[in-house]
Every structure is written in structure tokens, then in C-alpha cells.
Image (tube, rainbow, N blue to C red):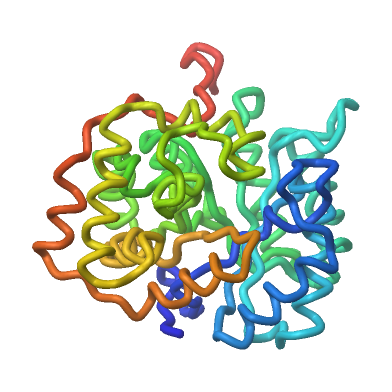
Amino acid sequence: MKYTYLADTGVKVSRICLGCMSFGSPKWRPWVLEEADAEPFFRRAVEAGINFFDTADIYSLGRSEEITGRYLREYARLDEVVVATKVFFPMSDRPNRSGLSRKHIQQACEASLRRLGVETIDLYQIHRLDPHTPVEETLAALDLLVRQGKVRYIGASSMYAWELMKALSVSERRGFARFVTMQNHYNLVYREEEREMLPLCADQGLSTIPWSPLARGLLAGTRTKVGDGSTTRSESDGLDKILYDQPSDLAVVDAVRKVAGSRGLPPAQVALAWLLRNPVVAAPIVGATKLSHLDDAIAAVEITLDDTEAKSLETPYQPHPVRGLTAPAPLSSRR
């Protein structure tokens, strides 16, 4: 396994982050694996040198955090791994169980610490921006968690570049802890982040840790069309039909298949190797429900694509509407 620094923190993370949304309860999503079925993935990841694990309180309503913490304590050294989790989405339909208010952030962090079984969360991320809470309050609450030793670093996810820059400016002016990562929607099929977000992160010294690096399995080359229902996830996941619905998306998939065929590699390895070429990408977050998915991700770290191959992968791309973000509140409602 290869490692890189997470932004300018001095912390080293593996070039692949194991996404733990797939582990929890099938009652939450039908494709999610139960605890016993998740065990081989953590064991294999740790054996391969992966030390970066991402989950969220919303995943299986906390069950993913419990499983992640339990197996990392069993198979890894907690002083060597980097555990990331997230806050924002509703944990129930009751009041104050969602969002980024000071109250919810503090309560959610305490709950995540208990479920993970750790004293400190390495990377605590806001899953989306909260249009009902001023960013100053959110950042003050996160900063307090850092000062209390409950969180080491903070990260952001899925927002517009101007929103990230505003948050970074508030942190600088107020002396708050600063976001060190951006968990964004980025892959060969969706590259709109290259316009503003990736250059901003490079300029401001943030690492990106892209979600859906294989476009919900589309870039693995096993599906012939979006929403084809060929897997349990594609059959039940309506989001892929929203994110990837352009004819050019399949042209990109064909390009991946061609490069993979010429190399004698699985398409997933090629798609991930392309992401890893970008110096602002620290580690794609790869979810897995089969061990072969994890093995492909591990193998991708050792693959180097040349410029000609990269160009052939990029050429079919056509611009998309911005997708994967929560729409910002009107400016008039922001403070």
C-alpha cells in the first residue's frame, strides 16, 4: 500500500479509503451487509495496509459506526488508523436530531464516539451544509470539539466552491479549526469539480477524498446502462439515475473498458488509477460488498496510467449539471 499526507496535517493515510456505508443493516438499504458479513472486508483492508476508514452516523442509523469501530479495534492499531465519520442527516424524525446546530453537532459527536468506541474522532466531517444554521455557529461548534480533544481534524463535503471558501475565511478570521478535507462527488463520469472545487482545494491546501469514485458501479464495467437493475444496489438505488443519465456517460465507460482491455485489467482498477493521478486527490472512498471490489481498489494503487491513456479516458466526457449537492439557501437568508 502507498500512503500520502492528508492535507498539511502531517497525518499519513492510505491511497484508498474504505467506505463503510456498505456495512450495517439491510433494513436501512437492501444491499448493506450485516456485521458478520462485513468482517472479512476489515480484515482484508488492514492486511493490505489500508489505514483510512470513512463512515457516518446516518449509515444504517449508527450501526455502521458500531461495526467499523468493533472491527478496527479487533484487527488494527487505533494509533495507526484514521477514522472518519460525518454529521448532518437526520437520525430520526424528532426535533434537533439533524443539521449543523451547535446542539446537534455536540450531541451527534458524543453519540459517534460511543458507537465507534474511541476517545477521539480523527476526521469529523459535515455531510452537507445546513441552510438553517449560520456557518459561523457550525464552525464554532466544530472548533470546540477540536479544543476539547474529541475531534482531531474537521472536513467538509458536497458543497459549492464559494461556500467552502466562505467557511475557510470564517475560520481564518475567527481563529477556528479549519477544514482539511473535501469529500466531493468526483469520478470519470462526473468531472464538474475540476472547474472550481479542485483548483480551490489545491490552492488552499485541502485534500480531496472523492465519494462514488466508480459512479455507483458504472465504471466497474459490469452494467450496460444506468439503472439496469443488474445488482441489488442498482435495483434499489434511485440516485444513480439522477447522477448519471447522459448518453456520454456510457461513452466514458466504453473508454474505460478499452484501456482496461489493452492492459488486461478490470475496468474498476483503471477508473481508480485515473483518480489517483490527480495530486489533490488523497484517497478515493471505495465501498465494497464483494471482496473482489476491495481487491480491485487495492491493486489500483500500483497502476500508473500514461498521458495517452488518460486522454483517451477523458475525451468522451460531456459537461453535466451540478449534481450531488444540497442546494444552498437564498443569500438573503444567510448571515
In the image, residue 150 sits, relative to residue 95, either above or below, namely below
Q: Residue at x 81, y 39 (%)?
A: 103
Can residue 154 be seen here? yes
Picture quarter containing residue 150? bottom right
In the image, residue 135 sits, relative to residue 79, either above or below, namely above
Choose between 30 and 301: the one closer to the eye: 30
Q: Is residue 72 left or right of residue 326?
A: right
Q: How many marks?
A: 0
Q: Residue at x 60, y 61 (%)?
A: 288
User: Where residue 76 sits in the image (x, y, percent)?
Assistant: 71, 85
Q: Residue at x 47, y 57 (%)?
A: 181
Image quadrant holding the C terminus, namely top right
Choose between 156 and 272: the one closer to the eye: 272
User: Where residue 325 sits in the image (x, y, percent)?
Assistant: 49, 31
Q: Is residue 328 left or right of residue 301?
A: right
User: Where residue 234 sits in the image (x, y, percent)?
Assistant: 58, 39
In the image, residue 109 sits, relative to residue 185, either above or below, namely below
